[in-house]
Amino acid sequence: DPRNKFGGTIFRFPFRYRSSKISKNIFTQEKVQSIFDTVKEDSSKLLLFLNNVKKMSFYYSDGSSFIKDFEINVSCRQLSCNINGSIITKISIATTVGSGNSEVEEWLTASNSKKLQLSQNEWKDGTASVSIKTKPEDQTKFSTVSVAGECFCFLP
């Protein structure tokens, strides 16, 4: 309803069920479900390096109403260590499917900001980050999780 205020950003994806002048790409219910399943599977990694996005909700319409399929929430806690200018952050990402229980993943992220030289007289702020999935043992100690084939490094 356009009269209600929404404190966020809404993306509406026009998954077409027949071709048009705009697009010949047709999305069957199975194809859309496959896209949602892929996003659910990778949901914890979607928000890992997006500093300003803290929550994403995915809905579908049954024709008369909108039904929440799943939601991703991020919470961050900066740890009190600063190693060689890097800031260490604990990131918790909770994925909730439907109205069920949340599955939580925890990550440690190290970020370092520097001035990057673009040309002889031009500089720009840049931040590089790297993350690793962890298993929390207590509030002061973490052990890493074996990560098969996944390593994330975000460069400016």
Image (spheres, helix red, strand yellow):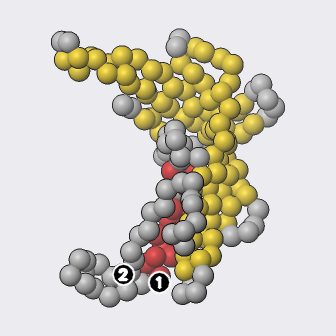
Q: Which residue is mark 1?
A: 29
Question: Where residue 154 sits: x, y (%)?
Answer: 43, 35
* The residue positioned farthest toward the left in the image shown: 120
Image coordinates for residue 59, horizontal then vertical, percent: 57, 71
92 vs 148, nearest the viewer: 92
Is 31 displayed left or right of 119 in the figure? right
59, above or below 153, in the image: below
- Discs 1, 2 touching: Cβ within 8 Å: no
Give the mark count: 2
Q: Is residue 78 above or below residue 10?
A: above
Residue 139 falls left or right of residue 46: right
Does the image show residue 145?
no
At numbered mark 2, what does the secondary structure look like: helix, strand or loop? loop
* SS for callout 1: helix
Task: Tell which tag, 1 or 2, sits nearer the viewer.
Answer: 2
Q: Residue at x 61, y 71 (%)?
A: 69
Residue nearest the viewer, comparing 81 with 9: 9
How far, Cα to Cα, is label 1 from label 2? Answer: 10 Å
- Near mark 1 (Cα within 10 A), the count class, few <14, some 14-19 or many ≥20, is few
Provide the residue designation for mark 2.
16
Q: Is residue 19 visible?
A: yes
Indicate which disc, 1 or 2, sits on the residue closer to the N terminus.
Answer: 2
At horizontal 47% and vertical 82% (from top left) the residue drawn is: 30
Q: Which quarter of the figure has residue 153? A: top left
Q: Looking at the image, is 133 positioned above or below residue 116?
A: below
Residue 15 in the image, given as x and y percentages of width and height: 39, 77
Q: Is residue 57 above or below residue 125?
A: below
**Residue type for callout 1:** Gln
Q: Amino acid at mark 2?
A: Arg
Residue 58 on image: x %, y %: 56, 66
